[in-house]
Image (cartoon, helix red, strand yellow):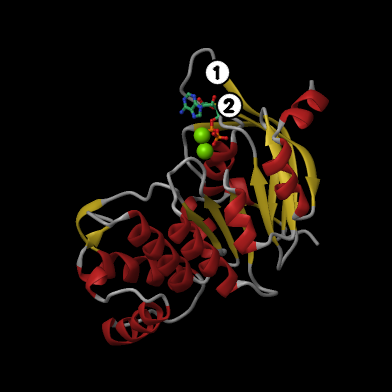
Amino acid sequence: NDFLKITDLHAEVAMSEPPKKILNGLTLSVPQGEVHAIMGPNGSGKSTLSYILAGREDYAVTGGSVLFKGQDLLALTPEERAASGVFLAFQAPVELPGVNNANFLRIAVNAVRRARGEAELDAVAFLKAVRAETKHLHMSDEMLKRNVNEGFSGGEKKRNEVLQMRMLRPSFAILDETDSGLDIDALRIVAEGVNSLRGPDFSALIITHHQRLLDYIKPDRVHVMAKGRILHSGDASVAVELEAKGYTRYLEGAA
Ligand code: ADP
Ligand code: MG
Ligand code: MG
């Protein structure tokens, strides 16, 4: 199953001088239909990995490969990645003052639909689809009229992120939930959003510090990351063990 296959990935910060190496031979596969988690201490390179998968330009890949559905993911533009089913959510979503949330979402949805060769949604069809989702998420429709993430509470931002994810129907979602001060309600919103999409055509990579989140999501597999590589992989019990014993034994094993 070659759904997402990251092999011996090496990457550095493009701008820093001398170049700063962040990923050091990272190897990781996510089969179709599975939800995996990456946990690791601060500074391991977890966010860098998600940025590279999304196509941010601040990083240079110096070795290795990323195959997504059999194609070279790193050769695709961020737009092409989105069109092929990749969705990236960030812990600190950007605020876009002056950009209406519903319009923004409609443009994003239609860009993906166009790229997939599907008919675009007109205003009426879009509103119908988005209202079904806001209802499902217990979100006020008023949030659609506001500017993207502007003045949103932490929970509202999470709901909006899940709304985007459900509207875009990705086949592979990357959620970086690392060091933000997520409360239990916010963790639940994210977990329910992921769980609601689970199925044979949905895979996800959940990057988190919070073992709590994984109580709700119950990942198929947990990968322990440190110093730019995966040191250990196992089932969901790895997260429970990390909570109890910390990262030390993995770090000692790697030294
Ligand atoms: P994590 O998400 O696991 O906490 P990050 O990917 O954010 O780790 O960062 C990994 C390392 O790379 C850290 O030491 C961080 O300071 C460094 N780093 C990340 N991005 C940059 C950048 N743009 N410029 C310089 N250093 C960076
Ligand atoms: Mg960090
Ligand atoms: Mg991070």
Q: Name the disc covering residue 19, or none.
A: 1
Determine whether the residue tagged by mark 1 lies in a helix, strand or loop.
Answer: loop
Placement of 160 over or under 12, stated as above or below: below
Residue 98: % across, % down: 17, 56
Identify the residue shown where x is 47% and y is 79%: 118
As drawn, is 23 to the left or to the right of 100? right
- Whether the residues at callouts 2 and 1 have beta carbons within 8 Å, the answer is yes
Q: Specify the quadrant that holds the C terminus.
A: top right
Q: Name the disc covering residue 12, or none.
A: 2
Identify the residue shown where x is 57% and y is 46%: 208
Residue 156: % across, % down: 33, 61
User: Disc 2 and disc 1: Cα gap in Å?
Assistant: 6 Å
As drawn, is 47 to the left or to the right of 139? right
Residue 23: % across, % down: 65, 31
Give, as a three-letter code, the residue at label 1. Pro
> Within 10 angstroms of label 2, few (less than 14), some, or many (20 or more) residues?
some
Placement of 64 over or under 203, stated as above or below: above
